[in-house]
Image: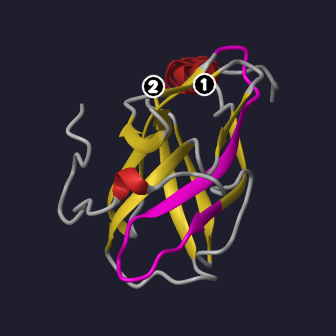
Amino acid sequence: MSSMPTPHHKSHGIARRALLASCVAVAAVTIAPAFAAGAPTVQAKGAWIRWLPANLPAGGYVQLSNTGDKPAVLVGAESPDYGNTMLHQTVSKGGVSEMIHVDKITIPAHGHMAFSPGGYHIMLMQPKKEVKPGDKVPITFQFEGGKTLTVDFEVRKPGASGPGSMKGMDMGGMKGMDMSGQHDMHGQH
């Protein structure tokens, strides 16, 4: 008997190569956009929340670093543990500090952005469950282009400090502020 392939064997080989080529083409089209978008270029460290009693709003603080070649634009944050999560900045006007809602924060390419007491922070309102010192609270940052980054924040006691301090900050502008059920506590958007 001859070891020469029959026409039937040749057609199987051609069919296999065609099937393999089709699979490679489909995989390339499906996977390429994910690789083109790249892995998230923002990293977080030192994430913590200053816990406040009686369901008062809490502040989240973290150092974000962008290792990418393009700016990363943070457009939101959310947590399954809080009903309302907003990006805020503390600013001084006429010697009084106040918090304002910000729509986006740009982290420069190969740069850093510190969320610290007295500056940018994540305002966490309307806890959905009891949150106490020692707990971990996940917060998902949302960036332009649909990328996300989920970070576990450690809940600390009210006297805790992190990168920065609230010493000397005049909280007089917050006296009597009713934050219950308010989505936009500053009347701005």
Q: Nearer the viewer, mark 2 or mark 1?
A: 2
Q: Residue at x 49, y 38 (%)?
A: 95
101 relative to 110, above or below? below
Residues 49 and 38: in front is 49
179 relative to 63, above or below? below
Q: Residue at x 49, y 35 (%)?
A: 92
User: What span is colored magenta in the figure?
Assistant: 48-70
Q: Position of residue 117 (x, y in %)?
A: 61, 52
Q: Is residue 141 left or right of residue 160?
A: left
Q: How many marks?
A: 2
Q: Is residue 12 visible?
A: no
Name the residue carrying label 2.
144
Q: Is residue 60 magenta?
A: yes
Q: Quadrant of residue 69?
A: top right
Q: Quadrant of the C terminus?
A: top left
Q: Is residue 76 magenta?
A: no
Residues 171 and 114: in front is 171
* Three-letter amino acid code of the residue under disc 2: Glu
Q: Quadrant of residue 54?
A: bottom left
Q: Position of residue 111 (x, y in %)?
A: 75, 25
Name the residue carrying label 1.
20
Q: Element under label 1?
A: helix
Badge 2 or badge 1: first in the primary sequence:
1
Q: Residue at x 50, y 57 (%)?
A: 139
* Three-letter amino acid code of the residue under disc 1: Leu
Q: Residues within 10 Å of mark 1 (few under 14, many from 20)?
A: few
Q: Is residue 161 visible?
A: yes
Q: Is residue 37 left or right of residue 129?
A: right
